[in-house]
Image (cartoon, rainbow, N blue to C red):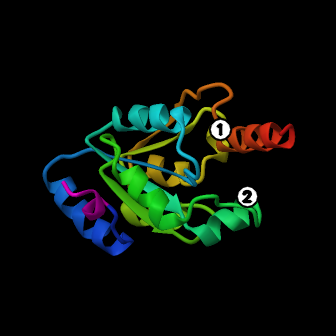
Amino acid sequence: MNVLTKIVTLQELESQMVHFRKTGKKVVFTNGCFDLLHLGHVRYLAAAKSEGHILVVGLNSDESVKKIKGDKRPIVEQTQRAEVLASLWCVDYVTIFDEEDPLSLIKTLKPDVLVKGEDWGEKEIVGADVVKRNGGKVIRARMIPDASTSKIIQGIIERYQKI
């Protein structure tokens, strides 16, 4: 599959969901900013993929990232972040969204499995109630200690201040 064909609109993805359901494919959904892709992200996405057949990643748009992380983020703009994510073997589809959280995506797609990091309490996971109400399950994936975009950025800043 061409990497760019894996980056789709919500409407395109919604029509694919009909096909997935008819063919018995289990759809897994996760979301995030994925600003500077690192080991924690890669392992997290591979773990998410292992929960089903199709992994859909909701990617926060640049506007959404600014609302969540502040004006200095994102470091990498959304089309580049989307293409990098889509190039990973474990990611089947990427869809960009503007809201601060993926609730609207989850309500529309009705995934079979919702995956978030173990740093989220189950009651804090946006859309968990929707997924469970539709017969799906929520997975809290193991995180890699000290693997975060914020820590990478902070490390770069500290190193360059010493120069």
Q: Does the image show residue 153?
A: yes
Direction right: furthest residue: 162
Depth order, front residue of 119/148: 148
Depth order, front residue of 38/91: 38
Residue 62 appears in which quarter of the rendering?
A: bottom right
Residue depicted at 59% across the width and 26% down the height? 144
Mark 2 is on which residue type? Lys
Label 2, residues with CA under 10 Å away: few <14, some 14-19, many ≥20: few
The location of residue 78, given as percent across then percent down, is: 51, 65
Residue 4 forms part of the magenta stretch: yes
Mark 1 is on which residue type? Ser
Q: Which residues are magenta?
A: 1-6
Q: Secondary structure at mark 2?
A: helix
Residue depicted at 46% across the width and 66% down the height? 79
Numbered-mark total: 2
Residue depicted at 25% across the width and 41% down the height? 53
Which is nearer the N-term, disc 2 or disc 1? 2
The quadrant in which the C terminus is found is top right
Residue depicted at 68% across the width and 28% down the height? 146
The location of residue 63, given as percent across then percent down, is: 63, 72
Q: In the drawing, what numbered circle is on residue 148?
A: 1
Depth order, front residue of 152/120: 152
Label 2 to label 1: alpha-carbon separation: 13 Å
The location of residue 45, given as percent across then percent down, is: 43, 39
- Prevailing secondary structure class for the magenta stretch in the rendered image: helix
Residue 142 appears in which quarter of the rendering?
A: top right
Q: Secondary structure at mark 1?
A: loop
Direction left: furthest residue: 23
Q: In the drawing, what numbered circle is on residue 69?
A: 2
